[in-house]
Amino acid sequence: MSLPRVLTLDADPRPFALDTAACALLVIDMQRDFLEPGGFGASLGNDVSLLRRTIEPTRHLLAAWRAHGLPVIHTREGHDPALADLPRSKYERNLTGPRIGDLGPMGRILVRGEPGHAIIHELAPHAGEYVIDKPGKGAFWATPLHAHLQERRIRQLVVTGVTTEVCVHTTVREANDRGYDCLVLADATGSYFPEFHLAALAMIRAQGGIFGWVGTTAPLLRALSS
Ligand code: C5J
């Protein structure tokens, strides 16, 4: 099934004209460390079950997106086993629970190669999809993401993942400053704090879309299937 070059999608503050020849789906940090008990999110005292509502919309979107051979990029937050890329400030931030690098039920917390660092099985990357490991909250900092997108002439990002106000927001701000248009999907992004989720989305679409656009998966799924 061939797609029109441009899909016009309902979004705020105005419709988003998705250029199917210059876009990628960016799935941020859908890792066991954030979505399952015993990982990094839980170590900070969060109720990780609050993020699970994002899984089904993202799974459906991935299936529809992949059916057209459109590019998918996954990110994973984490650190190398020696913690050489872990700033002291980030390490010391958690005063109460186990810290990054400590052993938990899913291996060492937020460390690459450990079971908790993996993307949840429901959204596991397919062969050939680009997986970016990032030490920070933003997917552009200390990663090859910008070069990867530039090489492929990608100018638009459809953004999903967790958490809305931390890694999604940081990445969207970084992308915006580098000239990418971002459409952030509300039902496929989530936070441990529902009020932060809403506020973060409001910040993106405010002031005429100061950082980007906010939509949902439904119009995109309809456009991809029609
Ligand atoms: C956090 C993230 N919340 N992926 N990381 O520390 O949003």
Image (tube, grey):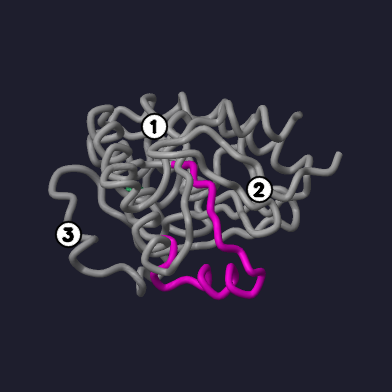
Task: Provide the residue span drawn in magenta.
Answer: 139-161
SS category of the residue bearing label 2 = loop
Figure check: 208 above or below 151: above
Residue beneath label 2, please? Answer: 125
- Residue that appears at 36% across and 72% down: 85
Q: Where does the image place residue 143, in percent across and percent down from the top left?
A: 47, 71
Q: Quadrant of the C terminus?
A: top right
Q: Where does the image place residue 47, in percent across and percent down from the top left?
A: 30, 27
Three-letter amino acid code at the position of disc 2: Pro
Density class for disc 2 (Cα within 10 Å; few <14, some 14-19, many ≥20) is some
Residue beneath label 1, please? Answer: 37
Q: Where does the image place residue 5, in percent across and percent down from the top left?
A: 73, 50
Residue beneath label 3, please? Answer: 92
Q: Indicate yes or no whether the magenta region holds residue 142.
A: yes
Q: Residue furthest right?
A: 1
SS category of the residue bearing label 3 = helix
Distance (Cα) linking label 1 and label 2: 21 Å
**3 and 2 marks in contact (CB < 8 Å):** no
Figure check: 181 above or below 49: below
**1 and 2 marks in contact (CB < 8 Å):** no
- Residue that appears at 46% across and 42% down: 161
Along the polypeptide, which appears first: circle 1 or circle 2? 1
Along the line of sight, the residue nearer the viewer: 80 or 193: 193
Along the polypeptide, which appears first: circle 1 or circle 3? 1
Q: Indicate yes or no whether the magenta region holds residue 184.
A: no
Along the line of sight, the residue nearer the viewer: 17 or 93: 17
Q: How many marks?
A: 3
Density class for disc 1 (Cα within 10 Å; few <14, some 14-19, many ≥20) is some
